[in-house]
Image (cartoon, rainbow, N blue to C red):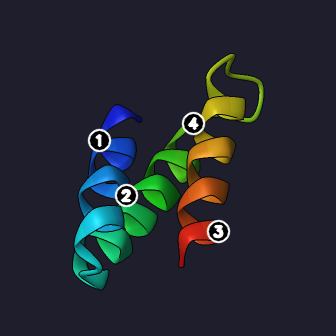
Amino acid sequence: MRRAGDLLEAATPLGDPGPLDESIDFARAVLAAVPADHPHRTRALINLGVALRHR
């Protein structure tokens, strides 16, 4: 899950949409892999939401 955040940080100051798109794709993949009752699912949802908000 940290990888999505790292990619988002890289995309924000550069204005390059590539890392942002990669961050969103990665966050979606993590979310798909995390079971609904997993304690880290909330963090995965937040990461995806933050990345989408930056788009």
Label 3: which secondary element: helix
Disc 1/disc 4 C-alpha distance (Å): 15 Å
The CA span between labels 3 and 4 is 21 Å
Q: Which residue position is annotated with label 3? A: 53
**2 and 1 marks in contact (CB < 8 Å):** yes
The location of residue 45, given as percent across then percent down, is 68, 45
Which circle's residue, 3 or 2, is located before the other in the chain? 2
Q: Amino acid at mark 4?
A: Val
Q: Amino acid at mark 3?
A: Arg
Residue picked out by circle 1: 3
Q: Which residue is mark 2?
A: 26
Residue sitting farthest toward the right: 37
In the image, 30: left or right of 2? right
| Residue under numbered circle 4 | 34
Mark 3 closeness class: few <14, some 14–19, many ≥20 residues within 10 Å: few
The answer to whether marks 3 and 2 mark residues whose Cβ atoms lie closer than 8 Å is: no
Q: Nearer the viewer, mark 3 or mark 4?
A: 3
Mark nearest the camera among 1 and 3 is 3
Labels 3 and 4: the sequence-earlier one: 4
Residue sitting at x 67%, y 21%: 38
User: How far is mark 1 from mark 3, CA to CA?
Assistant: 17 Å
* Structural crowding at the residue carrying mark 2, measured as other residues with C-alpha within 10 Å and reported as few (<14), some (14–19) or many (≥20): some
Local SS, label 4: loop
Is 47 placed above or below 34 here?
Answer: below
